[in-house]
Amino acid sequence: MYPWVTHMHAHLGGECPHECVYCYVDNPRFGRPDRYKGALRLIDGELKVKYGSGKTIFIEHMNDLFAATVPQHFINRIIMHCLEWPENTYVFQTKNPERYLTMDALFPENSIFGTTIETNRIINGISTAPLPERRLWAMEELTGRKFVTIEPVLDFDVDILAGWIDRIRPEFLNLGADSKERDLPEPTVEKIMALVSKLEEYGIELREKHNLSRLKP
């Protein structure tokens, strides 16, 4: 998913409650794997995996661990597993970052917290996740290491979205396009370049993903 991540691990089975139409778990040709169908559930064997040390591990890359309907005891057990292996960096990402704010003390010391903000606009029918502006507010409030991902980038207002990112002050921002060409409402090349320019002005490190090249000259 990210070149700066060395490992990924999923403890959760079942379908993500946010039902994003662009979800990369859904393969356009083969559909959704059985592991990620049905009710949310813990896969007990995954809680016994030995992480070792020196890794950067993206936790629950196939689901949203902090979605509102994920039971708290699921989250606690997964984080306790991470705490058993303290010599790693743990990457968490959610579209419900308000939940980060209720449990700071539980996270491993070497944690980095991300959110996805695809656009500053409200675009109906894309996802049931909290609205982008609520994600902005929570990430502003959050202390510690944090990043933002704009992927898949959806049509946006340059000054507003760039201003949001500046308010969050992430360590870096990941920027990428829809990888599966699902006919989403995407921005023009000019908007992409204007956003990149604004982020440079604000001194925010940009980490572009290879799929962004489809939208750029």
Image: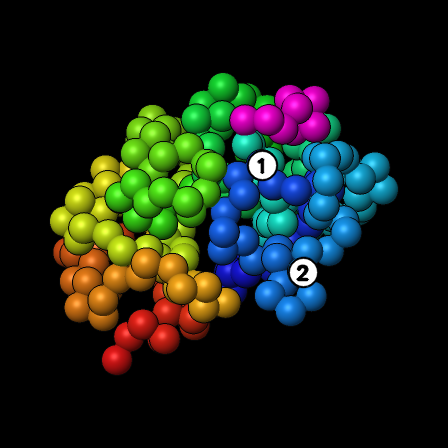
14 displayed left or right of 142: right
Q: Which residue is mark 1?
A: 17
147 displayed left or right of 88: left
Q: Nearer the viewer, residue 205 or 157?
A: 157
- Residue drawn at x 24%, y 41% is 164
Q: Amino acid at mark 1?
A: Pro
User: Residue 106's quadrant in the figure?
Assistant: top right
**Residue 76 seen:** no
Q: Which residue is mark 2?
A: 31
Q: Position of residue 40 (x, y in %)?
A: 70, 35
> What residue occupies the far front of the structure in this picture?
125
Kindly state the secondary structure of the residue where label 1 is placed: loop
Q: Amino acid at mark 2?
A: Gly
Estimate how packed mark 2 is, as few (under 14), some (14 to 19) or many (20 or more) residues with alpha carbons within 10 Å. Answer: few
- Mark 1 or 2, closer to the camera: 2
* 23 versus 122 height, above or below: below
